[in-house]
Image (cartoon, rainbow, N blue to C red):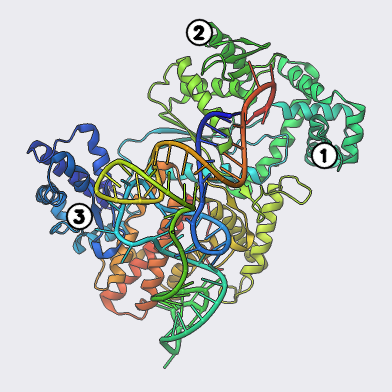
Amino acid sequence: MSSAGGAAGRVNLRSALRQAFRVALEACSRDGVAAIQADELPGLVEQVRETADAKFGDYSGTMAMALAKKAGKKPRDVAVEIIRRLEAAPGYADLFEPPGDPVGPGFINVRVKDEALAAALARAVADDRLGVAAVEKPLTVVVDFSSPNVAKPMHVGHIRSTVIGDALARILRFRGHHVITDNHLGDWGTQFGMILWGWKHCRDDAAFAADPTAELGRLYRLVRKVADAKPEELATDPVAAALAAKHPDAGREVLAETARLHEGDSENRALWSQFMPVCRGEIDRIYARLHVTFDHTLGESFFQPMLAATVDDLAAKGLARESRGAIGVFLRGDDAPPLLIRKADGAFLYATTDLATIRWRLEHWKPDRILYVVDHRQSEHFEQVFEAARRWGITGIEGVDLVHIGFGTVLGEDGRPFKTRAGDMVGLEALLDEGVERAAAVVGSGDEGRAGMSDEDRRHVAETVGIGAIKYADLSQNRTTDYVFSFDKMLQLTGNTAAYMQYAVARVEGIFSRGGLDREEVRRRCDGVLLADPKERALSLELLRFGEALEDVETDSRPNVLTAWLYDLAGCYSTFYDSLSVLKADGAERESRLALCDLTGRVLRRGLDLLGIGTVEKM
RNA sequence: GCACCCGUAGCUCAAUGGAUAGAGCAUCGGUCUUCGGAACCGAGGGUUGCAGGUUCGAGUCCUGCCGGGUGUACCA
């Protein structure tokens, strides 16, 4: 038996090569080639990366050029010194060909041995983890994402946090980290003051009985306009305008309702308890459809009992003080705006809850890292909260990474924030519906995979493709930039889209059902892979880089690194499959190529799964 | 005013300081008597907003402009 499931059988080629370079560089330093401090070693070792072009080999190291100046030597001479020690590094010769001479100004190019590649691939085929090694030092990582305000309908603005956060959590978990996901619901803020005010002044009992969610949504939208009292908004909404005229002080009254809720007013608390299940039911339905789950859903209300103590403690430590009736933490001197933690009317704020939440999480979960997947517009807020938390000196905060994973805005095709013609945010559910509807039309356009497909199957395929398209479009963008939302582009069957990737999976895996083959049997028989053709070798190497792609996703919390790699993998497969026979091949060649197909299908499927995207057998 | 982010092919987007700035769409051309053609191969298309600077090497780092966005005391 091969080492199925055994960590010893999994090799991350890049990590192995970096380790060899580390040894070589340490030797260079010892031998006086170039003085290298221990703290600059990691940066140099990271300069081992995949080559830009296969003609240069598989991996290259560029650190010789960086080291040349301080060594007082020519870059190529430094490279020669590194190469000499690299070849002697433990384990190097098992996996890699001798490097040869430096290229150009001093590139050290390395090629993986074919035998090592074939053996690693055979192990990956037999492995549930597809050859991906788990991290050596698992961290406890809290991922705080989605976090909608429950009293208002979820809209397109929530999709990015939800989808990116879910993907990051899945990937970190697969990497071997201990991941705790928490949906930090906005269930205690001013939006509830709006609902409360609306409930008391303009509710429609019949409408609430018929559809509580819709009625609460109506109240929120209506009262927000009344409270904001912007003339241009009121001009287009006579109902809101009439209410605003009748209640000129609505804005303040809304805040008063919020404050009463926070103070424990029995009527407002009772209404809150009545509204919450309605709100939760609404968002849970969407999460179910997105296949997104959370380990915890500790909303702001959960931390409410800790807020007064939070303010008191910060004040007692001399970090927070009164200013204009409110209480704030002054982080940048007396002139810069402080981080407010209590309003003049006594109500607490977003920052108060965030600080209390950090303390609670540190105490109960002892994380090494907390990721906040939140709109980039809140970057300043998080900078301040993190700074305040550190100065506060909460127990256990030393060494904990607090990271704001910001992301850009979703734009309409006009380049403006994505809104309906009326100017409202686009509802998330309606968005998903439209995606699925359009997917149904696209999926129905072919005929190959549809033979014998029931209506139910077709609905399932449309749902999987439609939701997948929306998620993939989001995840395949660099998260830091805004992006233009376009159903037409995300549902294309070519290019870097979910539909293309899902199709690739169906096509790859269709080989086995079409050929009437037992995949388990293919895997059992695989004891190596033939790499006679460059296309087979390219595909094999790409497959073994799955772990590297996941590692790179974690480094900068960027899921688009994974989508880009999956797309490259699909490209390698297409090239391979187009020119080399699989089912029509014979003997060992057929076995080898079937194993490649099997692994490609499983890696693509797993990769999409790690992005939260489903796949189908036929489409 | 101050702070942060962004300006890359006609369009939508990539590119952890590395080699000739890449994909898809669109345009044009080619392959194969389809192991799922929703394929594969190729071409054209770029002064990476502008001007300096650092570096062996800059789309990437620094400075200054131009243009766009966001945030800036009691929303979250």
Q: Residue A327 appears in which quarter of the rendering?
A: top right
**Most extreme residue toward the top, as rendered?**
A316
Across and down, in percent, residue A18 comes to: 23, 46
Tell me what residue is drawn at x 83 percent, y 32 percent.
Answer: A226
Residue bearing the label numbered 2: A317
Q: What amino acid does circle 2 point to? A: Lys
Under circle 2, the secondary element is: loop
Select label 2 or label 1 by which is in front.
Answer: 1
With A219 as the anchor, is A38 left or right in this view?
left
Which quarter of the image is occupied by the C terminus of chain A? Answer: bottom right
Q: Residues within 10 Å of mark 1 (few under 14, many from 20)?
A: few
Across and down, in percent, residue A497 comes to: 53, 61
Q: Is residue A369 above or below residue A52?
A: above
Residue bearing the label numbered 3: A105
Q: What amino acid does circle 1 point to? A: Glu
Tell which circle, 2 or 1, labels the residue nearer the N-terminal end: 1
Residue bearing the label numbered 1: A232
Tell me what residue is drawn at x 14 percent, y 40 percent.
Answer: A71
Select label 2 or label 3 by which is in front.
Answer: 3
The chain letter for the residue carrying disc 1 is: A
Under circle 3, the secondary element is: loop
- On the question of residue A293 being in view, the answer is yes
Residues behind callouts 2 and 1 on a single chain: yes
Tell me what residue is drawn at x 79 percent, y 36 percent.
Answer: A216
Instruction: Tell me how far mark 2 sits from mark 3, CA to CA.
Output: 57 Å
With A536 as the anchor, is A497 left or right in this view?
right
Across and down, in percent, residue A239 comes to: 90, 38
Q: Is residue A74 above or below residue A540?
A: above
Instruction: Tell me how far mark 2 sits from mark 1, CA to CA.
Output: 46 Å
Tell which circle, 3 or 1, labels the residue nearer the N-terminal end: 3
